Image (cartoon, rainbow, N blue to C red):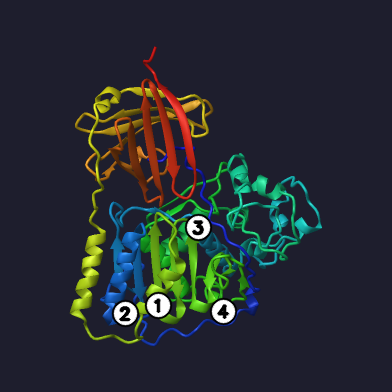
């Protein structure tokens, strides 16, 4: 379950990047000699044993097990164009779209690269305001006039923006999400720096790139992606949300299958080529050869950024990086791509080191039956849901079951809650206030497992994100408190709801992973 206003936009933030002009890029590294150029996954990924591709099954088994203990939803490792490891962690399954959050930025950057390759954009230093001459932009000065498309890709636009890369308050994105016209909101922001002078991660930058793609092509970024990126790569299953003005969101909200995320990485691994077609400008995909700027990240002094990609120069890897571990990691020297989807932050170094350690040779290794069994067991075990402990059911369960509790106006938009805990189909009903149309609401239903296992609802019952599936399980902590663990499968988030009853009163407490704690007091609707 995901409450509409609880679905606060999670923003993945980064800092300091400078992308060299395309003409200054050097050609990428040569492909490994044993890479099979016929292994294009357009119509489906070929598979292989790890050893056949020079990787160690035992090392990959450790990585799969690491994912099981760190809230992965999926892990895919491919080498030389073939999937060598593919794991899905219960209750998530690989046929479900997964929101990739800020990895969407890399897709938007890729689309801009395609438009540039096709001649729709004349130059990367084209002034941004040239695309918005029909808009009455506020706070225009010499600095704003100097913003270029490349500045947006670099996140060096100089626009005043408080996003909180190092844990500071996240202010400006939330203001933008409350506005009715995101493009206008971004363009009207005052300037804080001269463009190109300071990196400041801002979701508004890729949102402007999305708007520019629409103005260059006459199509939404999603429709341009369908024609120029998704269809050529054989990607047919996705969902991309839109801004209030109808544009494809550039900073996030794209959902893909994990196998299709791997195709994006493979396009970069193959230097922007796909089945003999050069889709990206020469050098665009060879990110490790770009001019890199240190991000001054507190957790990793080597972490760099280039053209919507996070770069680990000392580890010879780069990635599209989305909140809670939605990662597409490319290892050009190893001819390898790794994809993760997850429900909490993935430790980048652990992932990169684990994949690198598994790559033992460019050539095939001897078969290793014992290691293969370890990997097969780890993958099978990941797909099996493990039950959690369940407390005894108190007498209160019957008393509150089927009773509706209503709430005064609150930041969650929660109007009412009804728990059904005693019948054959335990479930939760909740009513949410909707922003559009004004003064409207909607009621949603989600099943609850009371035996330590998640119960999955229908995609249509999630009510908020098409294709996402609510999965809930609950237990009584004591005689007055019922707790529900919720996962919106494919959204990469865990949420916990706690219902504390006191006579006719209910205190509802929400804890969203990596986000917020909120409490709202309500009262039973049939109370005197």
Q: Which residue is mark 1?
A: 356
Q: Which residue is mark 3?
A: 104
Residue density around tag 4, few if under 14, some if 14–19, many if 20 or more, within 10 Å: some
Q: Please state the horizontal and vertical placement of residue 59, each as a whole percent of the image.
A: 31, 75
Is residue 46 visible in the rendered structure shown here?
A: no
Q: Is residue 368 above or below residue 181?
A: below
Q: Is residue 379 above or below residue 51?
A: above
Q: Return the disc, 4 or 2, that comes first in the chain's sequence.
A: 2
Q: Secondary structure at mark 1?
A: helix
Q: Please state the horizontal and vertical placement of residue 196, each as a whole percent of the image.
A: 71, 65
Look at the image and tell me in which quarter the N terminus lies: top left
Q: Return the disc, 1 or 3, that comes first in the chain's sequence.
A: 3
Q: Secondary structure at mark 2?
A: loop
Q: Is residue 60 left or right of residue 235?
A: left
Q: Return the disc, 3 or 2, that comes first in the chain's sequence.
A: 2
Q: Is residue 297 left or right of residue 507?
A: right
Farthest residue, direction right: 142
Location of residue 325 by image quarter: bottom left
**In whole angstroms, how far apart are the C-alphas of marks 2 and 1?**
9 Å
Q: Return the disc, 4 or 1, that comes first in the chain's sequence.
A: 4
| Residue located 23% across and 86% down the image | 366
**In whole angstroms, how far apart are the C-alphas of marks 4 and 1?**
19 Å
**In whole angstroms, how far apart are the C-alphas of marks 3 and 4?**
22 Å
From the image, state whether disc 3 or disc 2 is nearer to you: 2
From the image, state whether disc 4 or disc 2 is nearer to you: 2
Q: Which residue is mark 2?
A: 55
Q: Which residue is mark 4?
A: 289
Residue density around tag 3, few if under 14, some if 14–19, many if 20 or more, within 10 Å: many
From the image, state whether disc 4 or disc 1 is nearer to you: 1
**In whole angstroms, how far apart are the C-alphas of marks 4 and 2?**
26 Å
| Residue located 44% across and 69% down the image | 329
């Amino acid at each position: 379950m995901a409450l509409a206003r609880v679905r606060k936009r999670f923003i993945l933030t980064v800092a300091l990047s400078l992308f060299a002009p395309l003409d200054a890029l050097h050609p990428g590294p040569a492909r490994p000699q044993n890479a099979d150029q016929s292994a294009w996954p357009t119509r489906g990924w070929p598979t292989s044993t790890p050893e056949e591709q020079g990787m160690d099954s035992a090392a990959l088994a450790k990585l799969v097990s690491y994912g099981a203990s760190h809230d992965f939803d999926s892990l895919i490792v491919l080498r030389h164009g073939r999937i060598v490891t593919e794991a899905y962690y219960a209750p998530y399954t690989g046929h479900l779209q997964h929101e990739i959050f800020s990895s969407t930025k890399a897709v938007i950057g890729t689309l801009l690269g395609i438009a540039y390759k096709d001649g729709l954009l004349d130059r990367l230093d084209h002034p941004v305001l040239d695309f918005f001459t029909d808009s009455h932009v506020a706070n225009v000065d010499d600095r704003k006039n100097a913003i270029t498309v490349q500045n947006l890709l670099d996140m060096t636009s100089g626009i005043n923006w408080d996003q909180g890369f190092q844990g500071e308050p996240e202010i400006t994105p939330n203001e933008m999400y409350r506005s009715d016209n995101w493009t206008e909101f971004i363009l009207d922001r005052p300037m804080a720096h001269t463009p190109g002078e300071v990196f400041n991660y801002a979701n508004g930058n890729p949102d402007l790139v999305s708007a520019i793609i629409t103005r260059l092509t006459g199509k939404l970024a999603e429709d341009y992606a369908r024609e120029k990126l998704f269809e050529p790569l054989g990607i047919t299953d996705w969902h991309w949300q839109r801004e209030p003005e109808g544009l494809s969101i550039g900073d996030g909200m794209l959902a893909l299958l994990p196998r299709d995320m791997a195709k994006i990485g493979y396009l970069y691994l193959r230097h922007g080529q796909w089945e003999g077609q050069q889709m990206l400008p020469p050098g665009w995909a060879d990110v490790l050869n770009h001019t890199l700027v240190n991000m001054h990240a507190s957790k990793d002094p080597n972490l760099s950024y280039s053209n919507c990609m996070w770069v680990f120069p000392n580890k010879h890897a780069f990635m599209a990086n989305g909140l809670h571990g939605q990662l597409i990691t490319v290892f050009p020297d190893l001819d390898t791509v790794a994809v993760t989807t997850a429900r909490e932050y993935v430790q980048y170094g652990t992932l990169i080191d684990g994949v690198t350690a598994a790559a033992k040779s460019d050539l095939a290794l001897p078969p290793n039956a014992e290691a293969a069994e370890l990997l097969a067991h780890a993958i099978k075990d990941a797909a099996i849901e493990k039950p959690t402990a369940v407390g005894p059911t108190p007498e209160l369960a019957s008393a509150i079951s089927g009773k509706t509790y209503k709430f005064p106006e609150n930041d969650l938009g929660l109007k009412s809650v009804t728990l059904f805990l005693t019948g054959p189909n335990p479930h939760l009903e909740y009513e949410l206030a909707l922003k559009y149309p004004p003064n409207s609401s909607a009621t949603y239903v989600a099943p609850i497992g009371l035996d330590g296992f998640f119960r999955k609802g229908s995609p249509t019952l999630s009510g908020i994100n098409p294709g996402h599936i609510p999965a809930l399980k609950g237990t009584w902590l004591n005689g007055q408190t019922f707790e529900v663990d919720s996962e919106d499968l494919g959204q990469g988030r865990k949420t916990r709801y706690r219902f504390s009853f006191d006579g006719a009163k209910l205190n509802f407490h929400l804890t969203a992973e990596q986000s917020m704690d909120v409490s709202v007091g309500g009262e039973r609707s049939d109370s005197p």
